Amino acid sequence: MEHANLQIFIAIVLFSFLILWKILTARRGRGGFIRRIPGLNEIDEAIGRATEMGRPMIFHPGVGEVQNVGTLAALGVLGHVARKAAQMGSRVIVTTAIPVVVPVAEDIVKQAYTQAGRSELFNSEDIRFLAASGDQLALATANVMEQEKTAAHFFFGMYDYTSLLLTEPGQRTGAIQIAGTDQYFQVPFFIASCDYTVIGEELYAASAYLTREPTMLGSLIGQDYAKIIVLAVIVLGALSTTLLGSQNFFVQLIGVYR
């Protein structure tokens, strides 16, 4: 079987057109519909609750390296959390086991407080590299929860077996906890120990959902349209092959068999 180069080229052009089209329409004020994601909607409420109680909050961007797509999505959520916290005059403590994440997170939080006109509230010591080991990081984060008496915890990004070690102490203290990960094996632990959980690809949509920035919003919707087309082609291809055989017109058109 050879690669269907022409068909792939047409698909790339079509999907690129869809994404660019939705970006342009979003910039004109017609962003389109995005379904409600409860976990993301509750972020602002959790920040407000921590502010009312006069207690800080913790943001943990996962255990992945900074180039990991889950970590990048988490840093986008951190930007939103930091902006809201700055507007309300609250503290955000970031804990991580990845050294490279520290300067990136520090820059995101510092910029958020500066843009809100509350630069005096920013403290670089609130961006904390606690340990390189996952177990030690979880224990150190639990210690921060107890010492700082944090009222809201956010866990977004890629997680491993330490997910429950990170969230269970906060669940015991009664803090509101919101988590999001693209690692499906860790989702049950987050559901059991957190108030709200963002699952799978919802994490990738978080920045566009929270900021409503037209470029990200249009790109997100355009990609969803592309997924619908791919799914439709798969279903039609399977049905036509089952009913008409592998050499039917539709299969030959998309170039699956050579």
Image: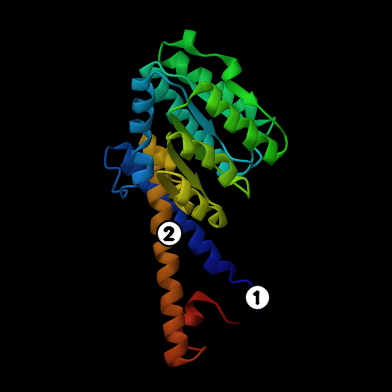
Q: Callout 2: few (<14), some (14-19), or many (20+) C-alpha neighbours within 10 Å?
A: some
Task: Please state which of residues 196 and 228 is positioned toward the viewer in this rendering.
Answer: 196
Helix, strand or loop status at disc 2: helix
**143 or 219, nearer to the observer:** 143
Q: Quadrant of the C terminus?
A: bottom right
Closer mark to the observer between disc 2 and disc 1: 2
Residue 213 appears anywhere in the view: no
| Image x and y of residue 251, in percent | 49, 81
Give the labeled residue for mark 2: 226
**Residue farthest to the front?**
172
Identify the amino acid type marked 2.
Ala
Q: In this view, does 128 lie to the left or right of 208?
A: right
Q: Position of residue 39 (x, y in %)?
A: 38, 43
Near mark 1 (Cα within 10 A), the count class, few <14, some 14-19 or many ≥20, is few
Q: In this view, does 224 lie to the left or right of 246?
A: left
- Residue occupying image coordinates x 67% and y 28%: 130
Residue under pointer 1: 2
Res. 93 visible in picture = yes
Residue projecting furthest to the right = 132
Instruction: Determine the residue positioned at 51% across, 29% down.
Output: 58
Furthest toward the bottom, the residue is 244
- At numbered mark 1, what does the secondary structure look like: helix, strand or loop? loop
Amino acid, disc 1 = Glu
Where does residue 47 sit, x and y in percent of width and height? Answer: 38, 28
* Residue 140 occupies quadrant: top right
In the picture, residue 211 is in which quadrant? top left
**In percent of the image, x 49 and y 62: which residue is there?**
11
Question: Which of the numbered marks, if any, corresponds to residue 209?
Answer: none
Query: Horizontal and vertical percent for residue 236?
Result: 41, 78
- Residue 31, by quadrant, is top left
Q: How is the image coloured?
A: rainbow
